[in-house]
Image (cartoon, grey):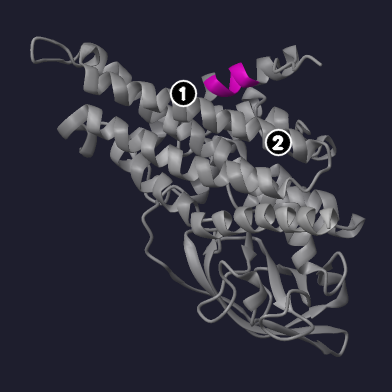
Amino acid sequence: MAVDLAYSGEIADLIKRTREFTRDVVLPIEDEYGGDITAAGGDELRIRMQDEAKVAGVFAPHAPVEFGGHGLNMSDRAPVFEEAGYSLFGPTALNIAAPDEGNLHMLAHIANPEQRQQFLAPLATGAVRSAFAMTEPAPGAGSDPSALTTRAVRAAGGWRINGHKWFITGADGAGFFIVMARTAGEPGDRGGATMFLVPADAPGLRVGRHIDTLDRAMIGGHCEVFFEDLLVPDSAVLGEADRGFEYAQVRLGPARMTHVMRWLGAARRGHDVAVAQVARREGFGSKLGDLGMVQKMVADNEIDIAATRALLVRACWELDRGESASNSTAIAKTYAAEAVFRIVDRSIQMCGGMGVSGDLPLARLSREVRPFRVYDGPSEVHRWAIAKRVVGAAKRAQADAR
């Protein structure tokens, strides 16, 4: 059966308009502020860029049509998100930045009608931002979510939540939080978590310090968040109680792939900058781009871009078919997280001193893509999971053959 990788005319047009909007409107702002979105104006800038994206018809490509979005599936999101990711501020301008994009995706699949109106609608239109509060300081939930220690217990009319989270992206200025808390079992148990929808101004919810991290392009920082006798009603439960880990899978696989899409765009920009530089820069009697060692770096970048995109396409195809895509998303995320850093790192090397300076965007791109090997699961955890599935399948096959 033939495989058709072409996009429809409608999607091709959206890709083109997103490319033009990102390069003409967003890139100059990023360059002016060196990729630091807080210095550029934070939420004030976000609102202004999103208003311009709405005028350009490229806003919220992933959001449900009923809330003003384009309703794209995962496969059609890939090239659009990649074009937006060409600028570090592009995802924020289109309302497809983490964590809002992943939260929107999950709410669209799980939220009840009342929750859709209260939380999903304002998130989809850009009226508010959100945060996903799961990660905790050791020995709490991190790469191993089953270590969850934040606890929600039954109280009159609802639940009382106590716990300490950190590295919560977008927490400062978020309109609401999706809070993962243990409602059954003990830390280490694979079940017993529940997701709660909590307005940011709820008594007992407190945003603490910004944790100083490499990246500067994610609005709202990466913060500590404290829950101190936070009382929420039963209506705050997202989905059903004790199914939080199950629901997290609705978010995590697609969110990992949208990270790949966005940062592939950033890596492509780095590659484009480097290729333009070596095509014009002369040294050792020729253009740098005519030297064998430079050509190897150019070729290796092209290979990493193509391989990342191919793995992404496969994973998105499986997700659109309703499959769990656990292995394909883990493979794509692990490869991409390392490939995009290699691409940017080679691009810096090709540009020499200029590459590590502020005269080119490469240094800030390196700063942004390096954490991807940690965010959404470290590469080591994904490799462990991939190997565990493969070896487990071999053991089952051997048992069946007996």
Quarter of the image where the C terminus is located: bottom right
Q: Is residue 146 left or right of residue 260?
A: right
| Contact? badges 1 and 2 (CB < 8 Å) | no
Q: Is residue 346 left or right of residue 280?
A: right
Instruction: Name the residue at 8% across, 15% down.
Output: 284
The residue under label 1 is: 23
| Majority secondary structure of magenta residues | helix
Q: Quadrant of residue 361?
A: top left
Magenta region, residue range = 15-19
Quarter of the image where the N terminus is located: top right
78 and 40: which one is in front?
Answer: 78
Measure how far apart labels 1 and 2 are at the Cα level. Answer: 26 Å
Instruction: Name the residue at 38% across, 26% down.
Output: 300
Instruction: Name the residue at 42% across, 45% down.
Output: 369
**Dot 2: within a 10 Å radius of its alpha carbon, few (fewer than 14), some, or many (20 or more) residues?**
many
Q: Tell me, yes or no, if residue 60 can be seen here.
A: no
Q: Quadrant of residue 7?
A: top right
Q: Residue 223 location in percent, x, y? A: 49, 67
Q: Which mark is residue 316?
A: 2
Q: Residue 61 location in percent, x, y? A: 70, 33
Q: Is residue 289 left or right of residue 109?
A: left
Residue 121, placed above or below residue 71: below
Residue 344, placed above or below residue 57: below
